[in-house]
Amino acid sequence: MDDVCRNGSANNDDANIISSSNTPYDEKERAHFNRIVSAFRAYRAFSLLRIVNTEKYFLSLPVNHRALLKSFRDNLDVIRTCIEKNNNIIKLIVKDVAYMFENVNHTLTCSTNQEEKGGVHQSVPSMNDQDKVQVTLKQFVRDWSEEGAGERRTCYQPIIDEILAHFPAHTCAPHDVKVLVPGAGLGRLAFEIARRGYTCQGNEFSLFMLFASNFVLNKCRDINMYTVYPWVHQYVNNMRLGDQTKPVKFPDINPSVLPPNAQFSMTAGDFLEVYVVENEWDCVSTCFFIDCASNVVAFIEAIYKILKPGGLWINLGPLLYHFSDAPNEKSIEPTYEEVREVINGFGFKMEKEETHVKTTYAQNPNSMLKCEYESIFFVCRKLSEESNGPAASTGDTASALQGEDDVLMQNGSR
């Protein structure tokens, strides 16, 4: 797999975890759920096949050519070992995913034996699904490793700083401030916000990300417990073998260590369908998120509606537009100038705005090819004369709470 600046391929498969009102919830949900489990379980065979094919081609080369590539086959063996070690992590990720949602149980269709022995629920993962498994491995670096600290400093810290500045502990009770993080990925930004005492909920629609975030947040109970080889599938633009097979330990912080009574949860589901209660959130924080929409206007409108009057929207990221040029998908790709007009049109007041903010996304620091965004960072406020007290919680989204041991994971399907 070549360098990926950010996973820009788009399709609606991940959004299928939200069932429509005309389709039985368990039928559609579980079919999608099992497909993603199958993708993770096919990682080893899919990845090793790449090495087998490379080795076959190498053996077909002229003898004098092979003699000049003295370490090539030995290097393939090192890569093979890294894949095996990644697969050990993947086994842990999918081990108990049938029970990861507080309000949904997938035990009937998530049998390890059925999946691994080709049972009736076995599905053949697509190339796109395998790419997403590999991208998920890289997310451990961005969100939960020491190596990802630089990216988090440029992408997450500006958002955290604005929350601290606008909701300081000496003027308000942080636990009364409700912060939503759509597109939460592996949950580090939402975790950091909750770690500072705020009531925070992360939302994610990709089961690839949700499986991994559940593993980190609820299964990792120490620092640097596990090792992943995130760049092992990057066969190009490597200066040396060690760059491709570099190990990365995670997590760099114990995810179970939160302040007493910290309120932190994650929900699964389409942002537009899960969050429909108006005037509920004090702050919505989006990082590399709004361009995940086929219609970015719908995202902006939803954010405006769910914010309390006077609430803040903090955003950082580029405009990659994931659905742009994707086969069989429709999309609009307005410029930032047009997006800004939409933001103002809905009634936001722009309070802070920075352009050309240099950011990266799950970047391999040792690659010969690097990708850098010049992102937009802004803070805007929902204007209204209306006063509004604490919003009542709704049963359709997860209660924002931190259990004694685990982060509540709830499917937000309606």
Image (tube, helix red, strand yellow):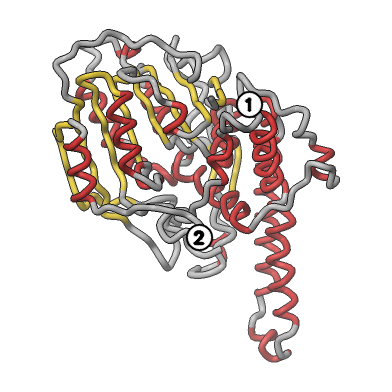
Residue bearing the label numbered 1: 100
In the image, taking residue 80 as reference, residue 102 lies left or right, namely left
Residue at x 75% of width, y 34% of height: 110
User: Along the line of sight, which residue is nearer the eye, 45 or 88?
Assistant: 45
Which numbered dot is residue 327?
2
In the image, taking residue 399 as reference, residue 22 lies left or right, namely right
Which numbered dot is residue 350?
none
Residue at x 24% of width, y 54% of height: 335
Q: Which amino acid, by three-letter code, is at mark 2?
A: Pro
In the image, taking residue 288 as reference, residue 3 lies left or right, namely right
Name the secondary structure under disc 2: loop
Q: Which amino acid, by three-letter code, is at mark 1?
A: Met
Q: Residues within 10 Å of mark 1 (few under 14, many from 20)?
A: many
Q: Position of residue 287 (x, y in %)?
A: 35, 40
Is residue 240 positioned above or below 178 on the image?
below
Q: Position of residue 51 (x, y in %)?
A: 70, 67
Q: Quadrant of the N terminus?
A: bottom right
Asked whether residue 244 appears in the rendered view, the answer is yes
Asked whether residue 150 appears in the rendered view, the answer is no
Instruction: Check the image and name the residue furthest to the front.
Output: 22
Is residue 269 positioned above or below 62 on the image?
above
Find out whether the residues at labels 2 and 1 contact each other: C-beta distance under 8 Å. no
Q: CA distance from mark 2 to mark 1?
A: 32 Å
Residue at x 42% of width, y 33% of height: 272
User: Along the line of sight, which residue is nearer the eye, 368 or 309?
Assistant: 309
Q: Earlier in the sequence, mark 2 or mark 1?
A: 1
